[in-house]
Amino acid sequence: MTPALSGFGLGMRRPHYASFTGGEAPVDFFEVISENFMVAGGRPIDTLMRAREHYPVALHGVSLSVGSADGPHPDYLDRLKVLVDRIEPAVVSDHLCWTGTGAFNSHDLLPVPLTGEALDTVCEAIDRAQTHLKRRMLFENPSTYIEFPGTMPEWEFLREMVRRTGCGLLLDVNNVFVTASNHGLDPRDWLDGLPLDAVGQIHLAGHSQGAHGLIDTHDAAVDPAVWALYAETIARTGPLPTMIERDGDIPPIDDLLAELALARATVPA
């Protein structure tokens, strides 16, 4: 039976593999990047399976590309389904973005113009993916750095996406803060427009100051302003599975566990 996701977790990254495969990390679940384990066998799968013996796992993808005009590639969906069926994750998620077309992959989370035409494309892609995997997925709100003219608010796009496809949301609180800051918005107004009852998981991460705005870098501790926004989010939603993402300048696992303790302390007992 596939376990439900609850409590507080970390992204499982290479420097900390031993803590997870040995069941020594004091977390409730862990998350991995799906593409790193979409292989037939070998050490990656062995590592994931050994960690999976101790914790529920969330699979978080970066290449489904639901915003691409081509939609999800059939081969990608086939390989993801093999991994899902093998691991039986508690959650399968990806991003509201596009990453490439045809054989080209940018290896970046590119922004989707928030238009009605793009919404049709995204919803069709999500329907295809959920049907192929035979399960509901979560989709993460991205950090954005540019705005397209003539578009709807992101929260309106997400709300309609959820309504039309039945998918859930992976709410990245850092991304809300980065996006709102970059576009001169109030992040609380952003939350006001979101279907919070569709949120199935929360991400927390660090960002950096760039030349023209904030950048979602995942290479620093969670900012105090993001912690404050997380507290407000939880006050609205109640407890939700929450994890810390760290992909660069990865510190000792005890440092991440200290951050995770802050998340635990934020949620009312």
Image (cartoon, rainbow, N blue to C red):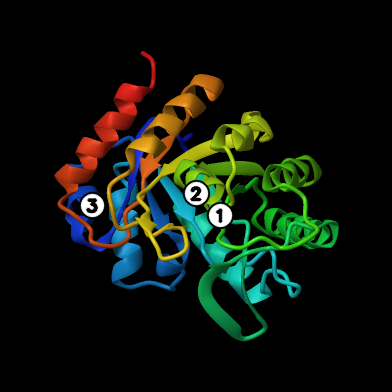
Q: Nearer the viewer, residue 126 or 184?
A: 184
Q: Residue flagged by tag 3: what amino acid is it?
A: Thr
Q: Nearer the viewer, residue 46 or 13?
A: 13
Taking 190 as reference, is 255 left or right? left
Label 2 sits on a secondary structure element that is helix
**Residue occupying image coordinates x 53% and y 53%:** 182
Above-or-below relation of 216 to 229: below
Q: Nearer the viewer, residue 152 or 261?
A: 152
Report how far apart the C-alphas of labels 3 and 2 lie in the structure.
30 Å
Taking 255 as reference, is 82 left or right? right
Q: Is residue 256 visible?
A: yes
In the picture of the structure, the residue carrying the numbered disc 2 is 175
Position of residue 156 measured from the top left corner of the image (x, y, whole percent): 74, 43
Number of residue marks: 3
In the picture of the structure, the residue carrying the numbered disc 1 is 142
In which quadrant of the rendered view does residue 47 lie?
bottom left
Position of residue 55 measured from the top left corner of the image (x, y, whole percent): 33, 41
Q: Residue flagged by tag 2: what amino acid is it?
A: Asn
Report how far apart the C-alphas of labels 3 and 1 lie in the structure.
30 Å
Q: Earlier in the sequence, mark 1 or mark 2?
A: 1
Crowd tier of the residue under label 3, counting other residues whose Cα lies within 10 Å: few below 14, some 14–19, many 20 or above: many
Q: Residue flagged by tag 1: what amino acid is it?
A: Pro
Q: Earlier in the sequence, mark 3 or mark 1?
A: 3
In which quadrant of the rendered view does residue 27 lie?
top left
In the picture of the structure, the residue carrying the numbered disc 3 is 21
Report how far apart the C-alphas of labels 1 and 2 lie in the structure.
6 Å
